Amino acid sequence: MIKFIVAALWLCAVAIGAVFYSFQTASAKIDAPPPPPFLGGLDSIKTEIVSVPVVRDGQIAGYFLTRLVYTIEPSKLAALSVPAESLIIDQVYSYVYGNPDLDFVGPETLDLETFRAGIRNRINEKVGEDLVHEVLIEQVDFLSKEEIRDNTIRRRLQAGTTASEMSKNFKEPAAASPPAAH
């Protein structure tokens, strides 16, 4: 009988200890500081492909195409009165047009770090606080006027060839013959 009482007391002590331990660890998680913004908690906004015409000497030299991703704190994003994507696209256009020194012709002449920092700084200046933390480049292309013209001509030629190739396989309609009698 004494063994039964000792086992019951032992079981009660273990149960009380487990409950006490679980409450201690749960309250420690609540009191923990929130993770820094770069370890989570940032929203990313992905733009559609932005096409900016590049004007040189009063002529369109080509088109700068880019798709960008921005990291923004959710609280600041919710406080914006203008859609974030509209603000971002406006600043991309302003940055490309406002910097005639940008040269998109060769990949070695475009400094991507300067481009990223320039767009980020222009957006943050426009808003008046640090809204955008990072600008990530998903795609960057430059199509010259000649490349666009060549692609258009090539597409037209391929379409014509395809149509004529397809029509070769069709048989000419046979001369009208009287229907067979049953």
Image: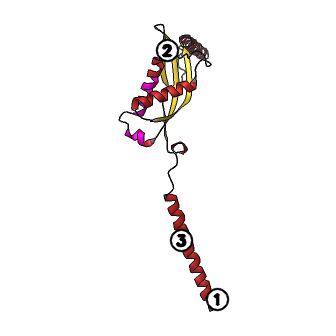
Quadrant containing the N terminus in the rendered view: bottom right
> Could you say where residue 22 lies in the image, as x and y percent from the top left?
54, 67
Against 50, residue 22 (above or below) is below
- Residue 16: quadrant of the picture: bottom right
Residue 3's disc is 1
Give amino acid for label 2: Pro
Q: Which residue is mark 3?
A: 20
> Could you say where residue 155 lies in the image, as x and y percent from the top left?
56, 15
Give amino acid for label 1: Lys
Q: CA distance from mark 1 to mark 2?
A: 91 Å
Q: Residue furthest bottom?
A: 1
Mark 1–mark 2 CB contact (< 8 Å):
no
> Could you say where residue 117 lies in the image, as x and y percent from the top left?
52, 28
Residue for point 52% across, 15% down: 101
**Residue at disc 1, secondary structure:** helix
Give amino acid for label 3: Phe
Instruction: State yes or no: residue 1 in magenta.
Output: no
Q: Which residue is mark 2?
A: 100
Q: Earlier in the sequence, mark 2 or mark 3?
A: 3
Q: Main secondary structure of the magenta part?
A: helix
Q: How is the image coloured?
A: secondary structure
Look at the image and tell me whether residue 182 can be seen.
Answer: no
Q: CA distance from mark 2 to mark 3?
A: 68 Å
Q: Earlier in the sequence, mark 1 or mark 2?
A: 1
